[in-house]
Image (tube, rainbow, N blue to C red):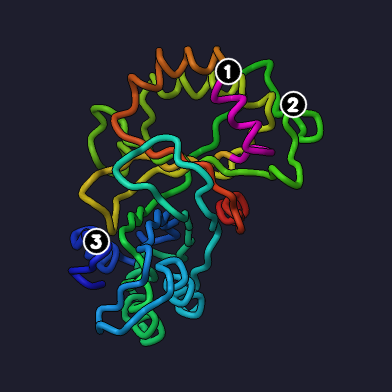
Amino acid sequence: MSNTVRYGTPNVEYAMSMAMMLPEDDGPVWMVNLMKYREVADYADGRESAISGRDADDAYSPLDSLAAVGAAPVFFGDVDQQLLGDATTWDRIGVVKYPTRKAFIDMQSLPSFQKSHHHKDAGMESTIVIGTQPMEMPTPPEGFEQADWADVPHPPTDDDGPVVVVHVLRFHDNPQGTSAANKTPDQMEQYSTEAAKVALGHGVRISGWFAVEDTIIGDGRAWHQVRFNEFPSKAAFMAVVMDPARLEAQKDHREAAIADTYTMIVRARLNELEASIES
């Protein structure tokens, strides 16, 4: 992959490790993409452009290149609201599952990918692309069960359908590396347990929790986990946000655990995360 792009800083060391990984050590990787678009597409060749950055990225859409290396999108959606994280306000979130890490590197050299990449370069103001692995799903706290969406206080409606809340997390005092990324601080474990007691009654479903291997394109920051939690409606999630017990757990535990975060409410167009982990 290129050592320089306008929309972020490539991690050459991570790219080299993926490219040189032995087949017996390689395996699937889920690339989480946070995307921020230019207001108007800016093509490097200086051409006049009246299309938006979002439209340029739609023109880039490398589905043929992904298919050529055995990869496929498993999550895609527009950010409805960003609640936490002010360094960048993201527009879209996407996740692509690659059959191997080397497949991600191999795709960069495909003629079809190189032909379409200028659209991404023109449309993308900034992006973070995070290599991740699925985490073991937590079990519900004893005595608590997930509510059916037909029985929750804020079920899905035509005006307020399901949303996926995406949390990108960096923990305090947690060294970088794959093994460390899989370790959740005790304070975050305690918060997750208390929050689940509230969220289960509002119909939360875990689409997937992922531990970060490394960031292949970004802004120099390290991350540890990315979590995707689905709710029957935005109103359901906001009811959890405002619940007094959850707020107390946030103050006592979550704030002590997290050094940096993005929290975004996403209207998903595609959500096959759970199926992609099970397959």
Query: Dividing the image into 4 quarters, which one contains the C terminus?
Result: bottom right
- Amino acid type of disc 3? Ser
- How far separated are the C-alphas under marks 2 and 3? 48 Å
Q: Is residue 69 visible?
A: no
Q: Secondary structure at mark 2?
A: loop
Q: Position of residue 130 (x, y in %)?
A: 35, 53
Q: Which residue is the site of mark 2?
A: 153
Residue in view at x 33 percent, y 57 percent: 127
* N-terminal-most mark, 2 or 3: 3
Question: Label 1 to label 2, Cα distance in Å?
Answer: 13 Å
Instruction: Classify residue 216 by image quadrant.
Output: bottom left
In the rendered structure, are the residues bearing label 1 and label 2 in contact, judged by CB atoms less than 8 Å apart? no
Q: In the picture shown, does residue 26 fall above or below 61?
A: above
Residue 159 visible, this orientation: yes
Magenta residues span: 230-242
What residue is rendered at 36% in x and 46% in y? 212
State which tag comes first along the sequence, 1 or 3.
3
Look at mark 3 in the image and give the residue it sits on. 17
Whole-percent x and y of residue 147? 74, 28
Identify residue for label 1.
243
Work out whether 30 lies above or below 136.
below
- Residue mark closest to the camera, 1 vs 3: 1
Label 1 sits on a secondary structure element that is: loop
Mark 1 or 2, nearer chain start: 2
> In the image, is residue 81 part of the stretch drawn in magenta?
no
Rendering coords of residue 206 (x, y %): 59, 39
